[in-house]
Image (spheres, rainbow, N blue to C red):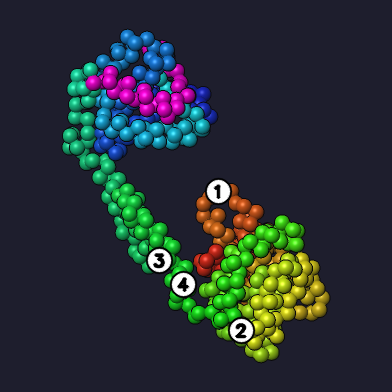
Amino acid sequence: MEGYVRSEYGNLWETHQCRPHAYGHTWSPGYELPSGMLHGQAVGTCMGFGAYLAMKSDFIPEIECQRILKVISDCELCLWHPIMEDGAAVWRSQVAMIEKRGGNLCAPIPRPLGESGYLNDLSEEMLLQRLQEYKSICLSYPRQGRGVEEHCTEVGLADPQSKKMAPPDDRFVVTPTDLLITTLSKAKAQNDMATVGEVVRMLDGVDGMVVKYSTQPSEALHNISVQTAKSNPNWAEMEKKGTTSRLLEAEMISGQAEGQLLKLLVKFGAVKKVLDIGTFTGYSSLAMAEALPEDGRVVTLERQEEAAKMAAENWASSPHVGKIESRVGEAQALLQALASQGESFDLVFLDVDKPGYFALYQTLMETGLLRVGGLLAVDNTMYKGEELTGERLSLNGEGARALNAGLLADDRVLQVMLPLRDGLTLAFRQH
C-alpha cells in the first residue's frame, strides 16, 4: 500500500492518468475474462506487448526488450495467448481505456528500463500490425510464449467467464417491462443476440398491443389519423413558405389509445367543458367532443393558423363539430382572454411546445381556468425518454421536466404519470 500511495503521490485525486503501475493493464482488460486467464497471466501478456511497443518506439533497445520477455517467460507467465488474435477485441479495450483515461491512451511502457514512459498514439491499423509482429517473436520462446497453468480452471478455480455468463437471478415478472428487462439481462449475460432481437420485437409490439385491446376510434378519428400521416410534405412546404412559424410533423398527433383515454375521462367525469391546448390536426379535440353530452363544449387553441384550418376541415363531416370552438393565437394570450371572460373548465388537455408547459400550467392555476375538482391531462411528460438516458436534456426535455417538478411541488394537485406512449400525466386539482 505504501508503494502504491508513493506512486500516486501528487495524483491522489486522479487529476491525470499517467500511472506507472498501470503497466500491463492497458489492453489485457479486454481479453482477460473471455480467455479465462488468471489475472497475472493476462497482465504478463500485456507487459510483454508493452515492452515490444517500447522497443518499436525507440524507448528501449532490443536487448532490453528481450530481457523483459525472458523474465516474464522464466516466471512461467504468459507472453502470448490465442485470444490476442482477436484484434478487434484488443482495439475495443484500447478505445475503452482511452475513454477511462480522460481521452488519452497513457499506456505506461518502459522508457528506459526501470522507468516509465507513455504511449499515447497508436492507431487501430498499427495496433493490429504490432500484435502480429509481437506474436511472431513470442513463438520463439518456451511453450511458444504460453504460460504454465495460465487459466483459472487449471488451478482449481471457476472459469470467470462462466460466472459472467450465468443468468442473473430471476426477477419476479409482474409487468411487460419486467419481462423485457429479465429477458434482455439474460441475453446480455449469454451474449445471445437472437434473444436481444426478440426483445426488440417485443418492445416494438407494446404500443400495438395497447391499441389492439382498446376501443377502436370512430371513422372520423380514423380519417384524421390517415390524413395526418400523409401531411409531412405539406408541413415542410408551409414552413419553407413561412405560412407556419415552425416545422410541424405528423408525429405530433395524439395516439389512438391516448384519444380513447381522453374520451373515457370525459365520460367518467361527466365533463361538460373541455379546454384543448394544442389543436394540431384536431384528433384530441374531436375525440373529447365525441364523448361530451349534446350541450358539452370543447374550446381548442392553436398557434398555427394552417393547422387550425386543417383541423376544421377534419371535423366538418362529424356530427359533433358543433361542440368545438377553435381559437387561433399564442396560448398565453388566448388563456388570458378566456380567463377575462370568466371561463373555467372541467378537463384541460395540454399538448403544445414543451418549453412553455410550466408557464401555461401556472396560468391555468392562477386564473382558475382549471377549476377546483377539475382534471389536467398533459402529453409528452416522459419526452422521448430523455431523462432516462442521464444525458443532457433538449429544450423540450427540460420543459417536460420543469412541469413534472412543478407538479410534484404543488400541493394543490394530485398527479400520476402514466407510461402511455410518450408519457401522459393526470393531475387532479383538489384546492
Where disc 4 sits, the SS reads helix
Q: Which mark is residue 36?
A: none
Eyeballing the image, is 326 above or below 112?
below
Q: Secondary structure at mark 2?
A: helix
- Per the image, label 1 sits on a secondary structure element best described as loop
Question: From which residue to which does the magenta span run?
Answer: 111-139
Q: Which residue is mark 2?
A: 290
Q: CA distance from mark 2 to mark 3?
A: 31 Å
Q: Which residue is mark 1?
A: 391
* Distance between the alpha carbons at the discs numbered 1 and 2: 41 Å
Residue behind mark 4: 210
- Which residue carries the number 3 mark? 176
Please tell me whether mark 3 sits on a helix, a strand or a loop: helix
Q: Is residue 121 magenta?
A: yes
Residue 121 point in image, percent of width and height: 47, 24
Q: CA distance from mark 4 to mark 2?
A: 21 Å
Percent x, y of residue 21: 40, 24
- Label 2 neighbour load within 10 Å: few <14, some 14-19, many 20+: many
Write the residue at 36% across / 36% down.
89
- Amino acid at circle 3: Pro
Residue 431 visible: no
Q: State which tag comes first along the sequence, 2 or 3.
A: 3
